[in-house]
């Protein structure tokens, strides 16, 4: 599902809201999750899952095309861990 499909589905389920309001709500939620992760915070949505940041140290890698060794810088990556409710629902354990 894309963001625009999510907005459309939410707008259909909430006909009392204007489409522009639903777009603003979805944008605000994504912006807040992004800002929290950028600050190094963890974002937990009970029953759905938790977003966090994993730090990867710098390392020596290898260019697969040439075989040449290259230095890979340290970086932070977003990580998502599913919640118990979502796992149970996906596995038919309602």
Image (tube, rainbow, N blue to C red):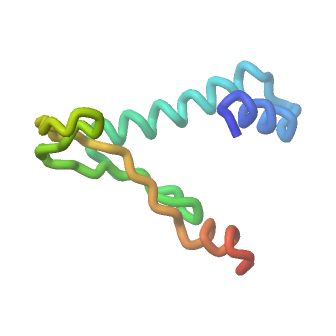
**Percent position (x, y) of residue 50?**
45, 57
Residue at 52% over, 34% down: 30
The vertical placement of 93 against 49, above or below, is below
**Percent position (x, y) of residue 36?**
36, 40
Q: Tell how many labels.
A: 0
**Dividing the image into 4 quarters, which one contains the N terminus?**
top right
The vertical placement of 23 against 59, above or below, is above
**Percent position (x, y) of residue 27?**
57, 28
50 to the left or right of 78? right
In the displayed image of the protein, which residue is found farthest to the bottom? 93
Q: Nearer the viewer, residue 30 or 1?
A: 1
For residue 61, what is the image quadrant?
top left
Q: Nearer the viewer, residue 19 or 59?
A: 59
Residue at 32% over, 44% down: 77
In the displayed image of the protein, which residue is found farthest to the top? 20
The vertical placement of 78 against 21, above or below, is below
**Dividing the image into 4 quarters, which one contains the C terminus?**
bottom right
Q: Nearer the viewer, residue 37 or 78?
A: 78
């Amino acid at each position: 599902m894309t963001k625009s499909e999510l907005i459309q589905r939410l707008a259909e389920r909430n006909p009392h809201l204007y489409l522009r309001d639903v777009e603003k709500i979805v944008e605000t939620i994504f912006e807040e999750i992004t800002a929290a992760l950028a600050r190094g915070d963890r974002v937990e949505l009970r029953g759905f899952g938790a977003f966090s940041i994993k730090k990867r140290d710098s390392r020596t890698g290898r260019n697969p095309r040439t075989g040449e060794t290259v230095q890979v810088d340290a970086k932070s990556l977003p990580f998502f861990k599913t919640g118990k409710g979502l796992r149970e629902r996906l596995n038919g354990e309602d």
